Amino acid sequence: MRTLFVAASIAMSLFLSSTSFGMGAEDVVKKSQAAFLYPGKDFKARVMMKLINKDGQERIRELTMLRKNFGEPGGDQKYFMYFHQPADVRDMTFLVWKYPRKDSDRWLFIPAIKLVKRIAANDKRSSFVGSDFSYEDVSGRAVEEDNHSLLREEKYEGKDVYVVKSVPKASESVDFGYKLSWIDKGSFIPWKEEYYDKRGSLSKVFTANEVKPVQGFITVMRRTMKNVQSGHRTEVVYSDVKYNQGLSDSLFTERSLKNLPREISR
Amino acid sequence: MGEGRLQMELSQEGPLDSRLYLKGDLIGDGVGEKGDADLREFYLDHSPFPFLDVRLGRQIITWGTGDLIFVNDLFPKDFTSFFVGRNMEYLKVGSDAAKLSIYPGLFSMDIVAIPRFTPSEVPDGERLSFFNPFAGRLSASGERLSAKKPSFTLGSTEIATRIYRDFGSYEAALYGFRGFFKEPAGMDPAEGVLVYPKLSTYGSSLRGPFLGGIGSVEFGYNDSREDRSGSNPLIENSSLKYLLGYERELWSDFTVRAQYFLEQMLDYGEYKATLPAGAPVKSELRHLLFLRLTQFLRYQTLQLSFVGFYSPSDRDGMLNPEVTYKINDRWSATSGANVFFGKKDFTPFGQLTRDDNLYLRLRAGF
């Protein structure tokens, strides 16, 4: 009788934990990265970035972005970017080979002097093209680099979400103290992320403003990163989103950097 | 100097995956009070096979691992533009060339044929003073350097090749060149002009991640074909060139690049033995240190940079601090200074000590 009672209570507590804390925080973050950064085998989009300062002055960055996955979500990826606007970066191309567990390889092609420049990439928190997004915000941060904990589950603008706190293990390597993420329980898209500085004050806020399925993949079509301390923000709009186009490996090479294939410029 | 430039660019896609590209500058020169035009690039691209890209016409070609120091890149440059503070894009000069880029799979290869010789622009007395080797002193005001280009014959076509591939994150390359010095490295005392002697080069490079940044090594052997023994004092000797480079982002938006360049003159004994009395003596080893610091601020609208060269062997160098402010997506303003120093008039930077300058550039892009 006694053994039965113990067994029943264990079963009960397991059941409770699986409902209230459905999965581990790290699993939530892994699934979120897979949904947000790795959907499809490959991806292509036209990206319009608006960099807006606190006085409302706008600068723009318009580019075509291609991504291809190599292996499972969380694994290696290659990115190719071609800049359309503004004039001082027009026709520049940028290639990233991302390896989650070591520094990415990055190359920038400067058309005016036909120079393929290798970019030192050890600081992933540097601003991407002068925007509020860092390189890491664009291509992701390895799950193992942070300690993740599930703070709570709640509703965010009517959607069921997990709220996850992520604390960098090597705090000296990053410019933030910790991050809170509001991750959709169904799609695992992050609706909101708050970055806190090392003094614990809110510094940057990411929001997914428009999300829709494209070829069955939930896609964040509009997003914003706002620096609440400087008042500067960056709004990003995706268009012409296409998945699984069978992008060839040869697109992600030095040859494409220097001699842009037509399938990219169009 | 005061100079206005209007640059126009035209790109036209043609049939069979071809593309015609043109970039030209109209120049209003406040020093010479004249107008000029500069056809920077004008070429046709075509890919007749999936493994082959062909580019025909006036084109800018760049390769190698150096930043402002070139070992295996024997394509023409315009150092005058750099020394007077023009935009970096004017450092490179187009070559009238045919370039084949071949991608068989295991490696990649470029073959460039340049039928018509284009020299590098070097200080020639028009804007910058130069060391006059005939007179053994710095150029006087109004004095011009005159140099005679190689004659335009079938045999004078220059050939440059590069074979390269990746090994993981590391990029390796082999280089070869047969043509002429791009700087006037020889003298013709009979005519009283400088000449561009025959030159072949062979080299290699490796670049990749190193100590949290990017490291590179490059080597080149310069074969001065008209003075293989080194005994002709009128023509530069053969040499070995070594370049080490390292770049690292020390903190967000702050990058440091350091380079060490060593040039070793070969047959130095012959050079010393045959040098005319009274002529300046170059050292056998030329060491050159290079530092570039770049800091972006305010969402990369403000860029502070510093470039410095210092040669412990020549005891000369230059300093180039610069600030660029991007007013908006169209307009940017750049201001900087070039300061040259050196003990001797005949060293590369020492000849420019009277040419310190401040510059201000306004640029609008549409």
Image: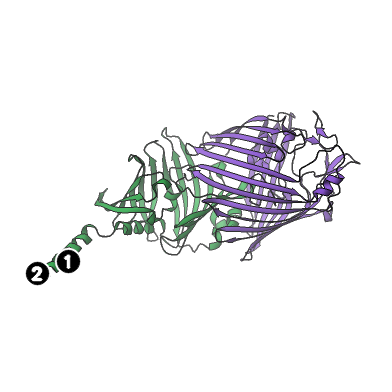
Chain colours: A green, B purple
Q: Crowding near pointer 2: few (<14 within 10 Å), some, many (20+)?
A: few
Residue at position x 67%, y 30% in the image: B357
Marking on residue A202: none
Q: Chain of mark 1?
A: A
Question: Is A165 situated left or right of A68 in this image?
Answer: left
Q: Which quadrant is home to the N terminus of chain B?
A: top right
**Residue B53 rendering spot, x and y as whole percentages:** 65, 59
How far is the residue under mark 1 from the one under mark 2? 14 Å
Q: Quadrant of the C terminus of chain B?
A: top right
> What amino acid is at disc 2?
Arg
Please check whether the numbered discs 1 and 2 fall on a single chain: yes
Q: Earlier in the sequence, mark 1 or mark 2?
A: 2
- Disc 2 element: helix
From the viewer's side, name the closer residue of B72 and B62.
Answer: B72
Which residue is most to the left?
Answer: A1
Q: Which residue is denoted by mark 2 in the rendering?
A: A2
The secondary structure type at the circle numbered 1 is: helix
Nearer the observer: mark 1 or 2; the answer is 2
Q: Nearer the viewer, residue B68 or A73?
A: B68
**Horizontally, is B82 left or right of A184 in the view?**
right
Residue beneath disc 1: A11
